[in-house]
Image (cartoon, helix red, strand yellow):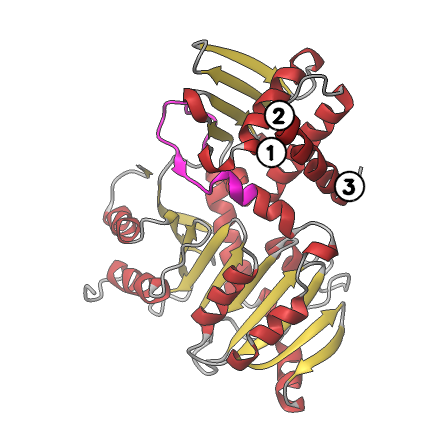
C-alpha cells in the first residue's frame, strides 16, 4: 500500500480503503486551491494523476457541469472501467473526498461513509 | 484509420487469431492489432492512472505494457517456460510476431488472464493495483462497437423510467422529450451542462469527463434533493432527474446495462 507521509488524515483514508476493498485510490483535496491534502492508494501514483482527480472534483462539484445549477454536494462518475465518487465536506465546502472504485464495485454506503470520514477529519464524532 | 475501424479490425483479428493461432499472420494484421490495443488502452482511465499494465498469463508468463501517456509505448514478455524476458517495441517489426503470439494468448484465454496496473517505477514483482480483468477490455470494445451490437440509450432510459422524474435525449442544445412533465423538463434544461462551443464554454467538459461511454450522477445541493443523471452511450447523450432514494438503483441498472 502506498500513501503519503503518515498523518492523521492519511490514517483515516487508509481506514476508508480497508473498509471498501474495491477502492483503489482515495484522495482528500481542497478544490478551491486545487491541492491534494492526503491520499491513500494500492500503488504510488504520479502527482499529476492525483491532481487530475482533484480537478475533476472541482469541475463536477462546483457546478461547472450543471449549468445554472448551484454547486452539488456529491457526485458519482461511472464508466465501464470503474467509478469515481466525489463528496464535499459539510464543514468546509472546499474540502472533498474522491475515491476510485474498480468496475462492478460501488458500495451503497460509500457517500455516507465518505461524509463520515470528512466529518472525522474536521474533528467530528467517529462513525 | 478511425477509432471505429480500429475496433472493428481488432474484433475480427482477435476472433481469427484466437481460432487459428498466429503462424503466417501478415505483418499488416499484426500492426493493426497493436494499433487497436493502443486505442483500447487509451480509452481506459485505469491505465492512464498507471504507467504499466501487467498481464499475468497462464504458465507463469507475464506481458508487461508501457502505457505512458495513455499510449502503448512498448511491451515486454517474461516467458515463464524459458525463464527469459523478450523486449518488444510497438514499431519493432522483427518482434511483432512474438507480440502477436502474446496477444493471441492473452485474448484467447481471457478467463485465465489477470490484468494489473502499476506505476512505471515499479518492477513486475512489485505489488500492483488490483484492476479489472482483461474481459473488461473486451467488454469495453464491444460496448463501443457498431450500433447493431449496442443497445441504445432510449432502452436504458425506458428501463429506469420508474426511478426517474423526467428524462430526455440531447442533441447538442436540442432536447428531445422521452418522458416527463413540461415543468420538470424546463427545470432540467436549466440544470444541464453549458453548450460546448460558446464563449463561456469553448470546450465540452461534459464529454471530457464522461468520455464515449459513461454516466454522471450529480447529487443534491441541500435545497434540492433530486439528483441529475447525465449519460453518454452509443453516441447519444441523455439527462434525467432521478427520484430521491433511487440513485443507487439507477447506477446499478446502468452497470447491468453496460455489462
Residue B171, image quadrant: bottom right
Q: Where does label 3 land, which residue?
A: B5
Instruction: Return the x and y of residue B131 as percentages of the image width and height.
Output: 44, 41
Residue A33 seen in the current view? no
Q: Main secondary structure of the magenta part?
A: loop
Query: Crowdedness of circle 1 by 10 Å Cα count: few (<14), some, many (20+)?
Result: few
- The chain letter for the residue carrying disc 2 is B
In the picture, measured across the screen, residue A4 lies left or right of residue B92, that is left
- The chain letter for the residue carrying disc 1 is B
First in sequence, mark 3 or 2: give its number. Answer: 3
Which of A92 and B123 lies nearest the eye of the viewer?
B123
3 vs 2, front mark: 3
In the picture, measured across the screen, residue A75 lies left or right of residue B14, that is left
Q: Which mark is residue A82?
A: none
Q: How far separated are the C-alphas under marks 3 and 2?
A: 21 Å
Residue B175 seen in the current view? yes
Residue at 65 percent across and 60 percent down: it is B233
Pointers 1 and 2 in contact (CB under 8 A)?
A: yes
Q: How far separated are the C-alphas under marks 3 and 1?
A: 22 Å
Check residue A94 for magenta coloring. Answer: no
Q: Is residue A57 above or below residue B45?
A: below
Pointers 3 and 1 in contact (CB under 8 A)?
A: no
Which of B237 and A92 lies nearest the eye of the viewer?
B237
Q: Where does label 1 land, which residue?
A: B69
Instruction: Return the x and y of residue B195 as percentages of the image width and height.
Output: 73, 67
Q: Which residues are magenta?
A: B117-137
Name the secondary structure under disc 2. Answer: loop
Q: Where does label 2 land, which residue?
A: B73
Instruction: Return the x and y of residue A87 as percentages of the image width and height.
Output: 41, 63
Residue at 74 percent across and 76 percent down: it is B175
Amino acid at each position: 500500500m502506498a500513501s503519503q507521509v503518515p498523518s492523521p488524515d492519511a490514517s483515516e483514508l487508509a481506514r476508508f480503503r480497508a473498509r471498501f476493498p474495491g477502492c483503489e485510490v482515495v484522495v482528500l483535496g481542497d478544490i478551491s486551491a486545487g491541492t491534494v491534502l492526503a491520499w491513500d492508494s494500492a500503488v504510488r501514483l504520479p502527482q499529476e494523476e492525483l491532481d487530475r482527480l482533484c480537478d475533476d472534483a472541482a469541475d463536477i462539484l462546483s457546478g461547472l457541469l450543471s449549468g445554472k445549477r448551484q454547486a452539488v454536494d456529491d457526485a458519482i462518475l461511472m464508466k465501464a472501467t470503474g467509478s469515481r465518487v466525489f463528496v464535499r465536506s459539510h464543514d468546509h465546502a472546499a474540502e472533498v473526498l474522491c475515491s476510485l472504485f474498480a468496475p462492478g464495485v460501488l458500495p451503497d454506503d460509500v457517500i455516507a461513509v465518505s461524509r463520515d470520514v470528512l466529518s472525522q477529519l474536521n474533528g467530528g464524532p467517529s462513525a | 484509420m478511425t477509432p471505429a475501424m480500429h475496433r472493428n479490425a481488432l474484433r475480427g483479428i482477435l476472433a481469427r487469431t484466437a481460432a487459428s493461432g498466429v503462424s503466417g499472420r501478415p505483418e499488416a494484421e499484426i500492426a493493426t492489432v497493436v494499433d487497436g490495443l493502443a486505442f483500447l488502452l487509451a480509452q481506459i482511465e485505469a491505465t492512464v492512472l498507471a504507467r504499466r499494465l501487467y498481464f499475468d498469463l497462464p504458465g507463469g508468463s507475464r506481458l508487461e505494457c508501457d502505457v505512458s501517456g495513455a499510449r502503448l509505448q512498448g511491451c515486454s514478455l517474461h516467458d515463464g517456460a524459458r525463464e527469459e524476458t523478450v523486449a518488444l517495441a510497438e514499431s519493432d517489426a522483427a518482434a511483432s510476431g512474438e507480440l502477436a503470439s502474446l496477444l493471441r494468448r492473452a485474448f484467447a484465454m481471457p478467463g485465465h488472464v489477470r490484468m494489473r496496473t502499476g506505476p512505471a517505477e515499479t518492477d513486475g514483482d512489485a505489488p500492483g493495483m488490483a484492476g479489472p480483468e482483461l474481459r473488461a477490455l473486451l467488454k469495453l470494445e464491444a460496448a463501443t462497437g457498431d450500433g447493431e451490437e449496442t443497445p441504445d440509450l432510449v432502452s436504458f432510459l425506458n428501463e429506469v423510467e420508474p426511478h426517474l422524474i423526467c428524462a430526455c435525449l440531447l442533441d447538442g442544445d436540442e432536447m428531445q422529450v422521452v418522458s416527463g412533465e413540461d415543468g420538470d423538463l424546463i427545470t432540467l434544461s436549466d440544470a444541464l451542462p453549458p453548450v460546448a462551443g460558446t464563449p463561456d464554454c469553448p470546450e465540452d467538459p461534459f464529454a471530457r469527463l464522461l468520455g464515449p461511454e459513461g454516466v454522471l450522477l450529480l447529487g443534491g445541493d441541500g435545497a434540492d434533493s433530486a439528483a441529475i443523471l447525465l449519460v453518454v452511450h452509443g453516441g447519444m447523450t441523455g439527462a434525467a432527474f432521478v427520484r430521491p432514494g433511487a440513485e443507487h438503483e439507477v447506477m446499478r441498472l446502468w452497470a447491468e446495462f453496460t455489462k
